[in-house]
Amino acid sequence: APSRLPEPRIAASVAPSTNSHLQIIDVTKNFGSQAVLKGVNLSVAKGGTTAIVGPSGSGKTTLLRLIAGFEHPATGSIALNDTKVAGDGVWLPAHKRHVGYVAQDGALFPHLTVGQNVAFGLDSAKLPGGRRGVAGRITELLEMVSLDPAMAKRRPHQLSGGQQQRVALARALAREPELMLLDEPFSALDAGLRVATRRAVANVLNKAGVTTILVTHDQAEALSFADQVAVMRGGRLAQIGNPFVVYTRPADRATAEFLGDAV
Ligand code: ADP
C-alpha cells in the first residue's frame, strides 16, 4: 500500500485570493421536517450577474435569504470575498455583510414618505454635510432609478407599482451594497414598464460594479440581465452555466420542459 503522506498545511492567511464574490458550499436548509435546500453549490464572480430560475417552491427565495443573512444554513457554508460568513460555527449578521435585498413586493414602509423610505438606508454620519447632505443624496438616488426627485414627499400608496419598486431599489442602493439580491423585483409590473425598469436597474448596478443575483420567472429577463443562469429544482441546482448554453442545451428533460414552459 502507498505510504500516507501528511496533509499539506496551508495557513488561512496565505490562501490565494480569488475573483469570487460569493461562494456557497454544500448548503442545506430545513423548515421543520421539510428539506428545502438539499446541498447547493454556487459561485458568483465579483461584478457578475447571476439569474436564478426554477419552479415556485424550489427554494430560490430561501437561498437569497441565506445569502443576505436572514436565515442560518443547517449544514454547509457561505463565504463573501473569501471570508466565511455562515456555517461551521461562523456567523456574520446581515447588517455587516454589505448585501442589499429587494423583496418581491418591495416592502416599503407605508407610513413614511418616499424620501424617508430611501433615507432609511442612509447613514447621515457618513455623508458630507451630515443631516443636510441626506436631502441631496435622496435626490441623487431617486434620479439613479429614473424617478422624479419631487416624489420624495409622496407616500408609497400614491405611487404606481413600478415606481414603488424603484423606490425599494433606491433604498437598497443607499447602503452602497457590494452584492445586490433581487427577488422577482419586476414581476408586479406590466410588460412595458418591466423592460424599462429592468434596463434602468441593470444600468445602475453595472455602473456601480455591484455583483447581482436576480430571481426571475422571466426568460428574457434572465437572458438580458445575467452572465450566469442557475436552474433550481427541488432544493438543488439542476444546472449552472452561461444563458446561451442553459437555454440551448438544458442538462436534462425536466430543465428543458421548465424552460420551455417559461417561454
Ligand atoms: P421559491 O422562492 O423557489 O418559490 P421558497 O424558497 O420560497 O421557494 O420556498 C421553498 C419551500 O420552503 C416551500 O415549500 C416553502 O413553503 C417553504 N418555506 C419557505 N420559507 C419557509 C418558512 N419560513 N417556514 C416554513 N416553510 C418555508
Image: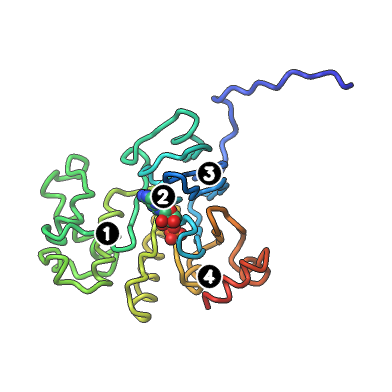
Q: Which mark is residue 223?
A: 4
Report which quarter residue 181 is drawn in: bottom left
- The label nearer to you, 3 versus 4, is 3
Against 225, is 124 above or below?
A: above
Pick the front one: 254 or 180: 254
Q: Nearer the N terminus, badge 4 or badge 2?
A: 2
Side of 255 where 179 appears, left or right: left
Gap in angstroms between the C-alphas marked 2 and 1: 14 Å
Q: Nearer the N terminus, badge 1 or badge 3?
A: 3
- The label nearer to you, 1 versus 3, is 3
Ligand 1: quadrant of the figure: bottom left
Q: Residue 256, how many percent across, how many down?
A: 63, 71
Is residue 61 visible from the viewing direction of this image? no
Q: Secondary structure at mark 4?
A: helix
Going 30% across and 54% down the picture, which residue do you hit? Answer: 173
Q: Nearer the N terminus, badge 3 or badge 4?
A: 3
Gap in angstroms between the C-alphas marked 4 and 1: 24 Å
Pick the front one: 126 or 159: 159
| Location of mark 1 (residue) | 170
Crowding at mark 3 (Cα within 10 Å: few <14, some 14-19, many 20+): many
Do residues under tags 4 and 1 come within 8 Å of each other at their CB atoms? no
Q: Secondary structure at mark 1?
A: helix
At label 1, which amino acid type do we have? Ala
Q: Nearer the N terminus, badge 4 or badge 1?
A: 1
- The label nearer to you, 2 versus 3, is 3
| Location of mark 3 (residue) | 24
Do residues under tags 4 and 2 come within 8 Å of each other at their CB atoms? no
Is residue 167 visible from the viewing direction of this image? yes
Q: Residue 197, how many percent across, how many down?
A: 34, 71
